[in-house]
């Protein structure tokens, strides 16, 4: 089994992005290929090429959410980009579609409550979210789901609010969940 894990570099006033740290800590695993992208719409548009090149069995996309106090797993991804804050390249989106001919939203093809229950049985807590925002993290989630592969999207809190070691534990347990499918 091969899992593609996609995260992002630090952005704005945040000193780090826990998704990058998670990928660095899991980099030695042979069943994982990790990509850390710039916080850029253009960069995230490369995701379908990465998926095609790597041919993973599963995809995990992760990003920072300074608004969460614990990791959250996203139920939906939306075919819309809308931002107030510019991306790393200074681009602001105002309601543009990610894919002109794509569905308006894509819900997770995985049973999110089952994943939560699996994680809970292993001592890991994760919230469920139905609002991934409409920024680059939503774009990555939407493109991953549009690929037709099974994927999970996570929002990770700031490191001061939740230890990266526990984020890593959650991702490792999600990988175990994938193995059991």
Image: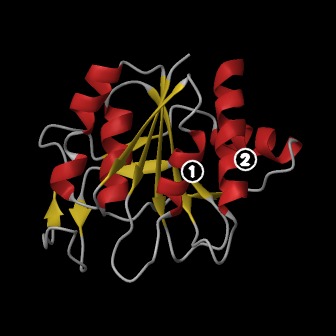
The residue pinned by badge 2 equals 169
Mark 2 surroundings: few (<14), some (14-19) or many (≥20) residues within 10 A? some
Front-most of residues 149 and 104: 149
Q: Quadrant of residue 88?
A: bottom left
Q: Is residue 129 above or below residue 102?
A: below
Instruction: Report the residue at 61% width, 71% height from top.
Output: 159
Q: Position of residue 148 (x, y in %)?
A: 37, 24
Above-or-below relation of 38 to 99: below
Q: Is residue 121 left or right of residue 23?
A: right
Q: Split into 4 quadrants, where in the image is the N terminus?
A: top right
* 40 vs 27: above or below: below
- Work out whether mark 1 precedes mark 2 in sequence or the reverse, and give the earlier one: 1
Give the left or right position of residue 17, taking residue 100 as reference. right
Q: Is residue 97 visible?
A: no
Per the rendering, the mark at residue 120 is none
Q: Nearer the viewer, residue 21 or 110?
A: 21
Q: Tell me where residue 42 appears, x and y as whole percent.
A: 15, 52
The image quadrant that residue 48 belongs to is top left
User: Where is residue 84 drawn, in percent x and y?
Assistant: 24, 80
Residue at image location 39% in from the left, 67% down from the top: 10
Q: Residues within 10 Å of mark 1 (few under 14, many from 20)?
A: many
The numbered dot on residue 22 is 1
For this orientation, the residue located farthest to the bottom is 13
Image: 118 above or below 17: above
Image point (19%, 44%), residue name? 45
Q: Position of residue 176 (x, y in %)?
A: 71, 28
């Amino acid at each position: 089994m091969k899992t593609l894990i996609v995260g992002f570099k630090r952005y704005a006033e945040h000193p780090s992005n826990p998704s990058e740290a998670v990928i660095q800590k899991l980099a030695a695993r042979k069943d994982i290929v990790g990509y850390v992208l710039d916080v850029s719409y253009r960069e995230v548009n490369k995701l379908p090429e990465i998926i095609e090149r790597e041919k993973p069995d599963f995809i995990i996309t992760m990003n920072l959410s300074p608004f969460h106090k614990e990791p959250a797993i996203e139920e939906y991804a939306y075919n819309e980009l809308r931002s107030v804050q510019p991306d790393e390249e200074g681009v602001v989106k105002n309601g543009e579609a990610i894919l002109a001919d794509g569905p308006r939203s894509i819900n997770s093809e995985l049973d999110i409550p089952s994943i939560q229950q699996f994680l809970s049985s292993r001592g890991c807590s994760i919230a469920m979210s139905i609002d991934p925002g409409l920024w680059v993290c939503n774009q990555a989630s939407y493109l991953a789901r549009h690929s037709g592969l099974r994927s999970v999207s996570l929002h990770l809190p700031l490191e001061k609010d939740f230890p990266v070691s526990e984020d890593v534990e959650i991702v490792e347990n999600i990988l175990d969940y994938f193995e059991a499918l």
